Amino acid sequence: MRTIEVMLMKLENIIEEAITKAGGCKQLADEMQISPSEISRFRNGEGGMTVPKLNKMLDIAGMVLVGHRDHKDMITT
């Protein structure tokens, strides 16, 4: 049986986790094929991000996004 850790996180925390796992903001931007300024604008609420880019960020952070109601059926550690 596979165990899944379920955490409720704010988007700011997900961004920080992606930056940490990538090794820095520039490295995250490089992996996402965007400019570091685009990440900065997004973090500061001055710009948006497409769903594919958000999915890439989640992948880099090692996370998946599930609906609030869906997480109740997951196994937690």
Image: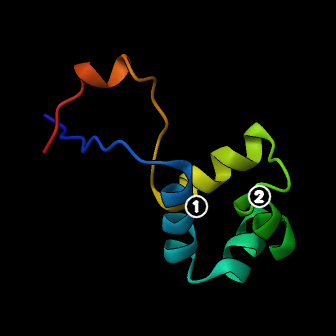
Q: Position of residue 46 (x, y in %)?
A: 84, 56
Q: Position of residue 8 (x, y in %)?
A: 36, 42
Coloring scheme of the render? rainbow
For image coordinates 56% across by 61% down, the residue present is 60
Of residues 45 and 59, the one nearer the viewer is 45
The kind of residue on which mark 2 rests is Phe
Element type where label 2 sits in the image:
helix
Q: Position of residue 55 (x, y in %)?
A: 64, 44
Q: Quadrant of the C terminus?
A: top left
Q: Position of residue 75 (x, y in %)?
A: 17, 31
Q: Which residue is mark 1?
A: 15
Q: Relative to residue 3, is residue 21 drawn left or right?
A: right
Q: Relative to residue 44, is residue 5 drawn left or right?
A: left
Element type where label 1 sits in the image:
helix
For image coordinates 61% across by 83% down, the residue present is 24
Say if mark 2 contacts mark 1, CB within 8 Å.
yes
Q: Residues within 10 Å of mark 2 (few under 14, many from 20)?
A: some
| Displayed quadrant of residue 32 | bottom right
The kind of residue on which mark 1 rests is Ile
Q: Quadrant of the N terminus?
A: top left
**Marks 2/1: CA–CA distance:** 9 Å
For image coordinates 85% across by 73% down, the residue present is 37
Q: Relative to residue 70, is residue 49 drawn left or right?
A: right
Q: Which residue is mark 2?
A: 42
